[in-house]
Amino acid sequence: MNDVPQFDPQAILESLDRHGVRYVLIGGIAAALHGSPHVTFDVDISPERSRPNLTALAAALEDLDARVRVEQHPAGIAFDHSAEMLERVEILNLVTRFGALDLTFVPSGTRGYDDLKRSAEPVDVGGLLVPVASLDDVIRSKEAAGREKDRAVLPSLRRLQRKLAEPGGDERPGAPANDLEAPEQTD
């Protein structure tokens, strides 16, 4: 991996699915699947923490050639993909052969996978049934994180939340129907 890879979120999700990883899709792509117009260039997930799932996640990370994302090293830095190592981390920002993948075991404002799974919505993404965090949970997490980039998108997410709560408001024109289309990256 010498260059920054082309972002292909579908390929990342397919690898997670192929290895049987249990997770909830969170962050910008989850918001986009609910209809948010904001563009994101990473896949954010909250994985389930059991040893069998961490073993499956480790295999998926190996398959994806995952490396720790470091600004000074665009190709990332090699790390131990083992379940034992994954047990010891809370957050991993990774680069894979298909783009950025962020693992957050306990996203801000949540109690992690079990909390998010309760209200996650299964969404067909290119033939994969992906557990997507509810828009309420995406908003809750972005509010709690309080980062500038999160605060910037909260007004439009709240408007979307209100619109979806209206009668007949469950149409999500901004969301891809059955595919995650990776926006073209510009330099």
Image (cartoon, rainbow, N blue to C red):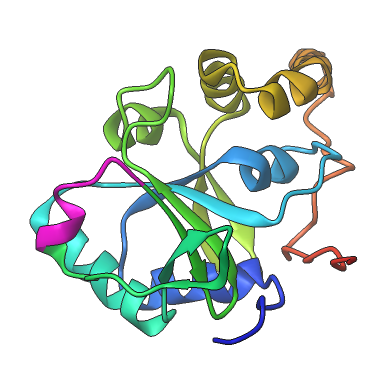
Q: What stretch is highlighted in magenta?
A: 84-91
Residue 168 in which image quadrant? top right
Q: Quadrant of the N terminus?
A: bottom right
Residue 88, image x and y in percent? 15, 47
Q: Which of 76 and 113 lies nearest the eye of the viewer?
A: 76
The reply to whether residue 173 is in sight is yes
Is 63 positioned to the left or the right of 59 in the image?
right
Q: Which of 66 and 126 is in front in this view?
A: 66
* Percent of width and height locating residue 18: 38, 78
- Which quadrant: the C terminus? bottom right
Residue at the front extreme, as displayed: 72
Q: Where is residue 163 in the image (x, y as percent from the top left)?
A: 84, 18
Q: In the displayed structure, would residue 24 be above or below residue 118?
A: below
In front: 27, or 67?
67
Residue occupying the point 74% across, 15% down: 165
Residue at 54% from the left image edge and 17% from the top image edge: 140
Is 29 located above or below residue 61 in the figure? above
89 in magenta:
yes
Q: Quadrant of residue 154?
A: top right
Residue furthest bottom as drawn: 2
Is 157 displayed left or right of 141 in the figure? right
